[in-house]
Image: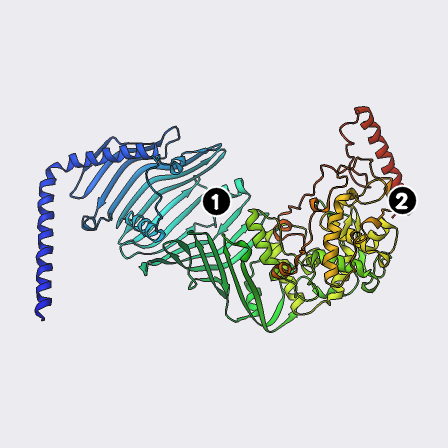
Amino acid sequence: MHPTLRKVLKISGWTLLGLVVLLGIAAALAWPKREALLRAAIERAEAKAERSYGLRVKLDSARFIGPTTVALANVSVVPAGRDTLLWLRRVEVGVNPLPLILGKIRLTSLLLHDGYAQVVRRDTLSNLDFLFRKKASDGSETRRRVNLADVAEDLTDNLLGTIPDDLDLRNLAFRLRDDAYRVTLLAERALMDDEELTSTLRLNGNEATWHLNGHLDAGDEEADLALFADGKPLEIRYLEEKYEFFLQADTLRAQLRDVGRSRGELHIDGTAATQSLRFFHPAIAADTVVVPASALDAVVAVGSNYVGLDSSSVIRLGKVSARPFVRYTVSPVKIYDLALHTDQLPAQDVFDAFPKGLFETLEGIRVAGELKYDMRMHLDSSQPDSVGFTSALTPTNFRILQFGAVDFRRINQPFDYTPYENDRPVRTIRIGPENPDFVPYHEISPNLKNAVMTAEDFTFFEHKGFNEKAFRYSIATNFKAKSFKRGASTISMQLVKNAFLNRNKDLARKIEEILIVWVIENERLVPKQRMLEVYLNFIEWGRNIYGVGEAARYYFGKSASDLTLGESLFLAYVVPSPKRALNHFVPDGSLRVGLRGWFKFVGRIMTRRGLASADTNAYGFYGVRLRENLRQQLFPYADTTGAASDSTFTMPMPDVDVDEEEENERGEGGINTFFRRLLGKDKKEPEATEAPVVVPGMESAEPPAEKTRKERRQERREQRRRERELKELQEKGGIQ
């Protein structure tokens, strides 16, 4: 052996022996005083809990019952002014002394008999409020940046340190009391022997019997646990009763494989899996969603200033696997990174992996070929306008062998369309030449087609159903607004929504809409001209006004082929909020001054693109006149907009911009946003200066407040009389 190495080993040996001797001496000296030391430690802990968190910690007795085991009796933890958080009749805790040398606590045994832990919420108050209590500061300390990896490592160590080698739980209840809602999970018995955990848990008395069993080795940082129930699925009715969220599963499984740190990054490697997962919430889907088998092989990565899922993680759904990447950077600025990637997958496996009950129109579809998906998003909160977003579903030899519940080619032929109002059918409209109000594509005024596409989706004839630039602009806009303000619905997406999908405003319908658009556009099932033709012939243009043929005749008493640029711009303007269309006119049939700026704005865009001639007279604004018979339905009002400048108007803007460079940067998309349409939150237009109108089917509107009560009653009677007359004329065919 090398002399230097021999010397090092000799010094190390003597040092270790010295430490052992010193620990022995310290233990010998402390042994007679250990009871006093224990009481002192408990008093310090009680004082700190009271001082820092307002917790009153009390116990009847504390004593040693072995060299390293402490017994406690009647332990209670009560937050100030709140319900008891914890009460335990008997507690025995054994501690491994060796890890204490390194400053770590490892329990060798834990016995808890008879007691409860509970969370109680009354109105807005909870007995967990102490967790959010802010510590007082004298302002002398400077804010120190926290290393998230260090925090995560400490939390993990402390959590694993509380898992004993031997566990004995009996009659320990876990309660949740949330106003009128109650949940109780009673651990009749939970034992861990030789790293094997077995338990019997009672949910809400005899409602269900659960078991949490498996392998648990805190020392090696490994675990494999399964949660299941006797004779029935796992279910917590509290979620359904309070949140309308139905959740069931046959088995939940969790695995911990490794915890380690390298290059300043903490990695937690594990798996979460479900068998026969079933859930329902009206915001998710119209029916119960069934997931036969799913799993997430997760590698959680925590760095000094970020936390997320490493790209080595894998999501498994049926025969399909995908690799997610998630990272949230907290400093110096907040940065959000998302990615999802798959290899080439059999296309049928992809469609089969969709949970049952999620996409009703696609169920039963048979396809061939392969699919690959890639998505990336990067958002720097300091410069949200530079957000990066790409999404691509790439087919290889993809083809449809058999359609599912709906053949998407059906709109190539005449078909019946039924619009709904408040979940009730309005009427059935024939989209085809059999309907006298149907207008073929070549007979629709180019002014209208160009105006609608400019406002809704200018790149309609170039894209394949989606506009990534519009998506990026939508993400940036919504992030800055901290709410759903703008989206990227294309005409293709709006067509699919109305032609094939149910009326539910849920997440499933939105995702299904995107999938169907991809299928139609990728397979070229419907020509673009036909898609635009159908769209213009069945969208709503006013109360019970559907299709451009009805709209042109209703508002202007002319055919769709004769619409002027100004009339077309008006119709394009009301697409997002068609029921308010008449509110934009004054009694003489002209448009309110506030719309003039919008006409100029869109008109200049159309001019720059060669779709209109330059016009210094507001692109037909002054030439728009409501047909004579319809003007009688408008209440007189005072136009408070007066001669306001065009720069002050606040009407909804199309998805276009005056600046060509900016326009190219963000692209064009629909006015109706992705999230607003999903949640049913239509943008509200300013109505403060708008006069109420009377149209067939509209509820009586109140006249201006300055009128007397008698005058208001007279106007309401006159309004009802006009409505009856109009209804009679409509039934006789005198007014359409």
**Nearest the eye: 240 or 576:** 576
Image coords of residue 134 (percent x, y): 38, 36
**Which mark is drawn over residue 628?**
2
State the image quarter where residue 30 is shown.
top left
Give me the residue at 48% from left, 44% from top: 236
Q: CA distance from mark 1 to mark 2?
A: 62 Å
The amino acid on which the numbered mark 2 sits, given as a three-letter code, is Glu
Image coords of residue 27 (percent x, y): 11, 44
Label 2 sits on a secondary structure element that is helix
**Nearest the eye: 641 or 449:** 641
Q: Residue furthest bottom?
A: 397
Count neighbours of disc 1 (C-alpha within 10 A) and say few if under 14, some if 14 to 19, many if 20 or more: some
90 w.r.t. 346: above or below: above
Is there a contact, CB below 8 Å, between mark 1 and mark 2? no
**Nearest the eye: 403 or 444:** 444
Q: Is residue 30 visible?
A: yes
Label 1 sits on a secondary structure element that is loop
Q: Quadrant of the N terminus?
A: bottom left
Is residue 500 rendered to the left or right of residue 200?
A: right
Count neighbours of disc 2 (C-alpha within 10 A) and say few if under 14, some if 14 to 19, many if 20 or more: some
Is residue 729 rendered to the left or right of residue 234?
A: right
The amino acid on which the numbered mark 1 sits, given as a three-letter code, is Ile
Give me the residue at 77% from left, 34% from top: 701
Image coords of residue 672 (percent x, y): 67, 52
Q: Which residue is mark 1?
A: 236
Q: Is residue 280 visible?
A: no
